[in-house]
Amino acid sequence: MMPLAEPLSAYPKYWAECYGTAPFLPTTRAEMDALGWDSCDIIIVTGDAYVDHPSFGMAVIGRLLEKQGFRVGIIDQPDWKNADDFSTLGQPNLFFGIAAGNMDSMINRYTADKRIRSDDAYSPDDKAGHRPDRAVIVYTQRCKEAYPETPLVVGSIEASLRRIAHYDYWDDEVRRSILIDSQADILLYGNAERALAELAHRLSMNEKIGDMTDIRGTAFVRDTLPNGWTLIDSTRVDRPGKIDPHNNPYQSDEELAAATGGKCQISSDKKTHDGSQVVTLNFLPKHSKTERAKTVIRVPSYKKVKSDPVLYAHASRVLHLETNPGNARALIQNNDGKDVWLNPPPIPLSTEEMDEVFGLPYQRVPHPKYEGQRIPAYEMIRFSINIMRGCFGGCTFCSITEHEGRIIQNRSEQSVLQEIENIRDKTPGFTGTISDLGGPTANMYRLACKDPKIEAACRLPSCVYPGICENLNTDHDPLIKLYKKARKIKGVKRILIASGLRYDLAVESPEYVEELVTHHVGGYLKIAPEHTEQAPLSKMMKPGIGSYERFKTLFEKFTKKAGKKQYLIPYFIAAHPGTEDEDMVNLALWLKKNKFQADQVQTFYPSPMATATAMYHTGRNPLKGVSYKSEKINTVKKLEQRRLHKALLRYHDAGNWKVIKDLLLKMGKKNLIGDGPNCLIPSSPNDHKSRSKQSTQKFITKHTKQGYKPLKKTFRQKKR
């Protein structure tokens, strides 16, 4: 069964609760004075503009800590060129909480082609340049300069996905754990409400932050291994090297364990005459039983994974095997002489706790200092509602599972309906449309394993790949009931579903598809098959295109029944690991055959810690057992080829005609060039240009009524 956790509401309130609830968490000394505060207990530093809304991390964490009784201040988008802005609220009594923001600062600033973006949706008026690269590291250093003795706690998705040595796309090399580079005291990964509440209360009782080594969902530097723990080398979990090597009689116990797949029992009872501790490692046979809760797995060191791609893929595989909070073990990795210890993931929040978090007293608007300025990320979500967290899809290019976990955490029906009423009554500009009722995935609400014991013991990376697990409950009835009740709320005219739909799950419930199509599609429904070819799909852990076709059949059936004109808008990824040029040509042909023209397309972006990023960096497949002889996969790394794959998704663009033509000729596919119905591109780019002038309606992905048809030749062309 899943381990028990202390409820968020179990802690006694801190004494500063007497100050009550702040209208907005203060960002200046003047705002603190107005609240009667002489100091902050906790200060959150963030790379995003402060929006007091449950979709913004600083607001969730700040309001949660406020409810625990602490005085919380916000330093948002500080000038990082010196430490002045980091001392504007004074020294916090307990700690600095440091976050890059809702996005990784590098992904926020650079495109998949490593070009600098000209905008930042989380900044006022969409202006870029309000946060540094690698914001967590920079902010931590500035906080340390301002107040060297104050504990530093790092979090957010940027820290979460860099908790161990990781491949960095922008440096094109493996970097150390961000805990080492930032020199923070502790790192909180995933949704950190539990860890933050516990850490704050323990600090308030004068416990040293260096002694807090038992909080789940945290990473920290450890000098010695604790007494009574069993150390397992990661090669026992997933062996990357040769099988059954000869034992070296001169090896230490730890080296012998690594070489044979055995393990070490750690004891530290002995002390020397000067009081120092003696740690003893005793070798245990490979098949001896150990207590999982007191077992730590040593993964290859930073130096080893930096120099050996196979060991990097192996370490990535082991990390992802240890992500289920029901059975995950602690991990340890040496980073340039310092051991980074990762405790198991946090226990998922209960429905009552989710309701508590989303029911905190958010103002649901940006801080008043941004009056008259647009914050695009807020504009996008101000009328949307998050009904759940987590995703069990396991898509290898996505980091949701690594950050939020694969166990779905649901809000209650009443909590969601209450938030709709709050939007209606309190959010400026509401005209009756809820723009989204979803989450990381639109239709995983209340879906879970049928048996909690199986769920706690499962070590599979996905519940829906290569097919839907027989133990997964796919009943969409709770979601259908939620939709129906939401539509009945007075003042609500329309509720749209904008979150990504898991269509392989949706087809298991035709009733859900009918409900969705009849009432919740605003003309276009976005779904993400990502590709049509099996080679890249198998590396993405996505279902075959047949699942899309089955959903399309239901979508069109119920659209016709409802008497509406609605379209599916599929999304695809170019240059994903495992993709060959021919795969992209076949995808382009599928797009043309199905009459789709994409105006904006996405290229694979190797984000830290994702399984697909490990594939990109190593050329190996961590979804299977990794060894020096295991499967090698094609990776698209050269900028020219990445752009070529992207161009194939926009086969209809005259600007891409030449590069596609050159590729087709190189591949011996001249038959795909011409004016026939089975050709991918016309004989001349002029046909592209003529057709583009006829099309005036633009979409991110555009559906065309007739698809590509070459124009009839003009008299001048015939004469030539």
Image (cartoon, grey):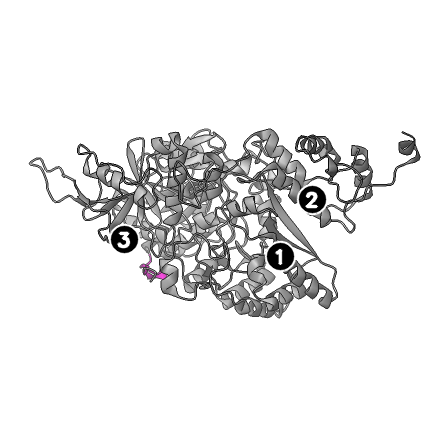
Residue 690 position, x and y percent, is 82, 38
Q: Is residue 635 magenta?
A: no
Q: Is residue 266 left or right of residue 670?
A: left
- The quadrant in which the C terminus is found is top right
Q: Main secondary structure of the magenta part?
A: loop
Residue 130, placed above or below residue 227 = above
Label 1: which secondary element = loop
Residue 546 position, x and y percent, is 61, 55
Pick the residue in front: 346 or 314.
314
Q: Tell me which residue sits at (19%, 49%) in the image.
A: 228
Q: Tell me which residue sits at (31%, 42%) in the image.
A: 235
- The residue wearing badge 2 is 589
- The residue wearing badge 3 is 292
Badge 3 or badge 2: first in the primary sequence: 3
Q: Amino acid at mark 3?
A: Arg
**Marks 1 and 3: which is nearer the front?**
3
Pick the residue in front: 342 or 150.
342
- The residue wearing badge 1 is 435
Q: CA distance from mark 3 to mark 2?
A: 51 Å
Whether residue 40 appears in this view of the structure is no
Magenta region: 4-13
Residue 447, placed above or below residue 226 = below
Q: Amino acid at mark 1?
A: Ser
Q: Tell me which residue sits at (62%, 70%) in the image.
A: 488
Label 3: which secondary element = helix
Q: Which mark is residue 354?
A: none
Q: Is residue 10 magenta?
A: yes
Badge 1 or badge 2: first in the primary sequence: 1
